[in-house]
Image: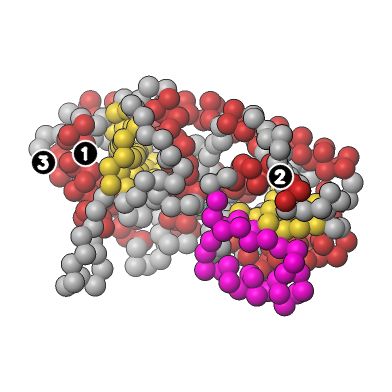
């Protein structure tokens, strides 16, 4: 099948999922066309089955806001026609589902029918999408999609509560490629980060408010009072500066390493003992799953779709949002001796393997088939 994928190309769960999905589909013989404003960060290699089409938005001084949706839908029309695309898969409702719908309509004028699958990722619903300024357009474009998928049961329920959705929402969980992580690095360069007797705790995110970065630091602060440890903070975002200041204020600046954005997440997780994800909301928590497949247990909040990934008392622990004391106690419980830590590590990888791409990819292919059938009906 020839599939056009629209996503955000930046660091962030939805872009990562879209990119990894596209790569996996291409490996299965599909022809995949990414249409976005920059080459997605995890799309390092283009091959025979993978194409990238850049959306350009010319700067025009008259416009206060440059019309990205317009440029995207025009690019979609051109790409779909030029490459005879069978199906459009948009990740993140805003503005992709809206632009996709416009492209569909323009193509229909020319007698071309292309079904659209929309995948909801979380913030497009729970944070941004429900804002009254966007809600009618998001509601409309979800209802106009031929198939709608959501990355967790929790996000599906949230979407049904917030919007007036007329079509079915199919839950297809996020995934990881377990083979990609099989080559556990023998030289993790752990010694570059911490002393032998120190535990390594990691947080990876885009440092937005929703990630509750101060909670990460405060939980770590309590852990390090009882267990020699280092905290590695990976990512960039608006909360980073405040986090650096908080570390200095708490006198733990020398125990916290800020690495910025990284394409070597698996290397960092390879030497991590524990992952912290105390988010305010999280439709799924792909970062937690990536930690788990690298044998890293997770201390998280119990919000949104996280409980569908991190199993309380098995792969880590879940606490109410902001319950820093409990999160720290649970972390100390896991880290206190090698035997307990090893048990949680093994549980983490076992659970993560349930989300292997080989199990999830066929679910997307099935969805594509049913959407494609609707194309035949409408053609
Ligand atoms: O919150 C982020 O880190 C970025 C955001 C995004 O849109 O890329 O992530 C969302 O989608 C991910 C992939 O499906 C999910 O794993 C994240 O839980 C979700 N973030 C939120 O719901 C806050």
Q: In the rendered image, which quarter contains the C terminus?
A: top left
> Picture coordinates of residue 161 (x, y %)?
48, 55
Is residue 262 or residue 211 the one in the foreground? 262
Q: Which residue is mark 2?
A: 189
Helix, strand or loop under label 2? loop
Which residue sits furthest top?
Answer: 29
Q: Earlier in the sequence, mark 2 or mark 3?
A: 3
> Picture coordinates of residue 229 (x, y %)?
80, 57
Residue under the image location 65 percent in, 47 percent down? 268
Is residue 180 or residue 282 the one in the foreground? 180
Which residue sits furthest bottom?
Answer: 249
Residue under the image location 50 percent in, 43 percent down? 151
Label 2 – label 3 distance at C-alpha: 58 Å
> Picture coordinates of residue 191 (x, y %)?
76, 48
Vertical position of residue 87 compared to residue 198: above or below: above
Is residue 337 or residue 233 the one in the foreground? 233
Query: Which residue range is magenta in the image?
Result: 233-262
Q: Which residue is mark 1?
A: 79
> Picture coordinates of residue 93 (x, y %)?
37, 51
Which residue sits furthest left?
Answer: 110
User: Is residue 257 highlighted in magenta?
Assistant: yes
Contact between marks 2 and 1 (CB within 8 A): the answer is no
Label total for image: 3
Residue under the image location 53 percent in, 26 percent down? 358
Q: Which residue is mark 3?
A: 109
Nearer the observer: mark 3 or 1; the answer is 1
């Amino acid at each position: 099948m020839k599939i056009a994928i629209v996503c955000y190309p930046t660091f962030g769960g939805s872009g990562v999922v879209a990119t990894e999905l596209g790569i996996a589909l291409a490996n299965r013989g599909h022809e995949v066309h990414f249409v976005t404003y920059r080459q997605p960060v995890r799309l390092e290699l283009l091959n025979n089955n993978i194409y990238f089409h850049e959306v350009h938005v010319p700067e025009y001084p008259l416009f206060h806001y440059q019309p990205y949706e317009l440029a995207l839908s025009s690019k979609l029309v051109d790409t779909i026609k030029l490459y005879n695309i069978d199906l459009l898969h948009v990740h993140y409702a805003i503005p992709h589902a809206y632009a996709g719908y416009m492209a569909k309509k323009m193509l229909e004028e020319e007698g071309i029918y292309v079904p659209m699958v929309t995948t909801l990722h979380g913030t497009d619903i729970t944070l941004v999408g429900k804002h009254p300024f966007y809600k009618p357009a998001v509601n409309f474009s979800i209802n106009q999609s031929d198939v709608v998928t959501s990355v967790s049961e929790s996000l599906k329920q949230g979407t049904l509560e917030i919007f007036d959705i007329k079509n079915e929402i199919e839950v297809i969980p996020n995934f990881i490629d377990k083979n990609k992580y099989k080559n556990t690095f023998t030289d993790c360069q752990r010694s570059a980060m911490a002393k032998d007797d120190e535990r390594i705790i990691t947080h990876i995110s885009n440092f937005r408010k929703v990630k509750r970065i101060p909670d990460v630091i405060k939980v770590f602060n309590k852990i390090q009072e009882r267990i020699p440890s280092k905290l590695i903070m990976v990512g960039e975002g608006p909360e980073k500066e405040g986090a650096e200041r908080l570390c200095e204020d708490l006198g733990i600046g020398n125990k916290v390493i800020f690495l910025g954005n990284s394409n070597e997440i698996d290397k960092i997780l390879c030497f991590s003992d524990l992952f912290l994800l105390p988010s305010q909301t999280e439709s799924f928590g792909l970062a937690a799953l990536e930690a788990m497949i690298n044998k890293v247990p997770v201390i998280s909040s119990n919000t949104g779709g996280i409980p569908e990934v991190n199993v309380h008392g098995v792969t880590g622990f879940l606490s109410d949002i902001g319950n820093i004391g409990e999160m720290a106690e649970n972390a100390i419980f896991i880290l206190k001796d090698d035997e307990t830590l090893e048990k949680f590590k093994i549980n983490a990888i076992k659970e993560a393997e349930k989300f292997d791409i080989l199990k999830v990819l066929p679910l997307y292919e099935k969805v594509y088939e049913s959407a494609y059938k609707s194309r035949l009906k409408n053609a």
